[in-house]
Amino acid sequence: MPNKPNAKKALRQSIKRKALNDERKLAFRKAIKSTIKATTKEEKLNMVKQAQKALDKASKNGVIKKNTAARKLSRLMKKINSTK
């Protein structure tokens, strides 16, 4: 446990940031999984938009890097286009 006030505040901040980062990470992971599980082509296209939005938000906020988001989206699109 931190003793100094500034260390206590830093701990509170890091706990809040971790919670937000975990939420954002969970959001894009769920979006990707639900896109893969979607049955119809229209459904998949709608889910891809949500997945892209979640990935962009995660990369914008620094949860994942920009290239990581691009790679995940690229692989997702490749999977969706291969299944017809």
Image: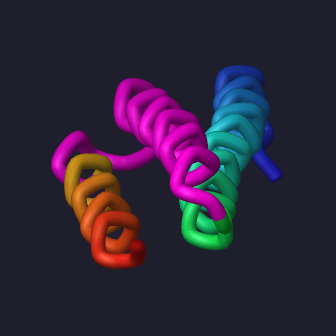
In depth, the one of 38 and 60 nearer the eye is 38
Q: Is residue 77 visible?
A: yes
Left or right of 33 in this view: 80? left
Left or right of 38 in this view: 32? left
Residue drawn at x 26%, y 68% is 78
Left or right of 80 in this view: 48? right
Q: Quadrant of the C terminus?
A: bottom left
Residue 41, how many percent across, how many down?
A: 52, 55
Where 51 sits versus 4, above or below?
below
Residue drawn at x 47%, y 28% is 57
Q: Is residue 42 magenta?
A: yes
Residue 75, how many percent across, how many down?
A: 28, 67
Residue drawn at x 35%, y 73% is 79
Residue drawn at x 31%, y 49% is 69
Left or right of 81 in this view: 2? right
**Residue at the extreme left:** 67
In depth, the one of 47 and 81 nearer the eye is 81
* Highlighted magenta segment, given as a residue range: 40-68
Residue 74, how many percent across, how many down?
A: 23, 58
In depth, the one of 12 and 35 nearer the eye is 35
